[in-house]
Image: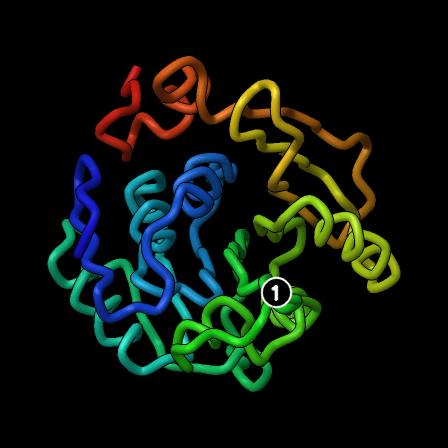
Amino acid sequence: MGFQCRQFYIKDDQCAMKVSTDSLILGSYVPVTGVSHVLDLGTGSGLLALMLAQRAPATQVTALELEPAAVLQAQQNVAASPWPHRIQVRQADVQDWREATQFELVVCNPPYFNQQLPSASATRELARQGTTELLEWAHCAAAHLSAGGRFYWILPLSVSQRIATQMAANGWYLVDSLAIKTTARKPVKLMVQGWQREPAQQVNTEQLTVHEGAGYSTAFRRLTGEFYLAGQST
């Protein structure tokens, strides 16, 4: 199993969680201007790391993953990509990992299905539910962000609403918010949130509808066009 992007191919048969629209949106949306070091927490197949390496040609990417099979597959995907020299995949638990490097951008598509029934697959349960509370991902980000750096993740709407208060209590300031709807008639399903450690003058709020009619919306195709074959590259 795998997924073909415009400039690289992702194999994900050894990863509990497969390539998803969530990661495609997150990796396409986060700002990369002026970014030289990126940290990808819970990289899985390495999709986000590869997307950000493509978008920011001078960037060095560190990708952390706990599950050994996913680590190996992410390393293989990176090795087969155009940017193997700019991406490091490491097996690590975000609760314990510390490094001196400071990152201007930290991204995470976290395991947020912690209210669901246990999965029949132990690795899929780890990826979907995780052993790490959401705030642990934020704590790891905070420990490694450079001055003025930002942390982005994508969450279900209900989870994002609950965690926002906790994030604020832990010294985070919301700076970007992208509400994602499957179709125009459906309610918001997901939120991309961008956080920083300094007060923001204002919060940039946007909305994205993924599908319109029988296909993808113009906005979705434009956003993901650098990667998704069904997107718009211009």
The x, y position of residue 169, in whole percent, is 88, 61
Residue at position x 51%, y 39% in the image = 30
Name of the residue lying farthest toward the left = 80
Question: Is 211 located above or below residue 84 in the figure?
Answer: above
- Camera-nearest residue between 176 and 116: 116
Residue at horizontal 56 percent and vertical 86 percent from the top:
96
Residue 3 lies, with reference to residue 184, above or below; the image says below
Q: How many numbered callouts?
A: 1
Q: Quadrant of the C terminus?
A: top left
In this rendering, position of residue 7 left or right of residue 149: left
Compared with residue 68, is residue 84 higher up or lower down, i.e. above or below? above
Q: Name the residue under label 1.
A: 141
**Side (left or right) of 167 relative to 106:** right
**SS class, disc 1:** helix
Q: Residue 54: image x %, image y %?
A: 28, 42
What residue is drawn where x is 38% and y is 21%? 216
Q: Where is residue 75 in the image (x, y as percent from the top left)?
A: 22, 69
Q: In this view, does 191 lie to the left or right of 128?
A: right
Q: Would residue 121 appear left or right of 10 to someone viewing this image?
A: right
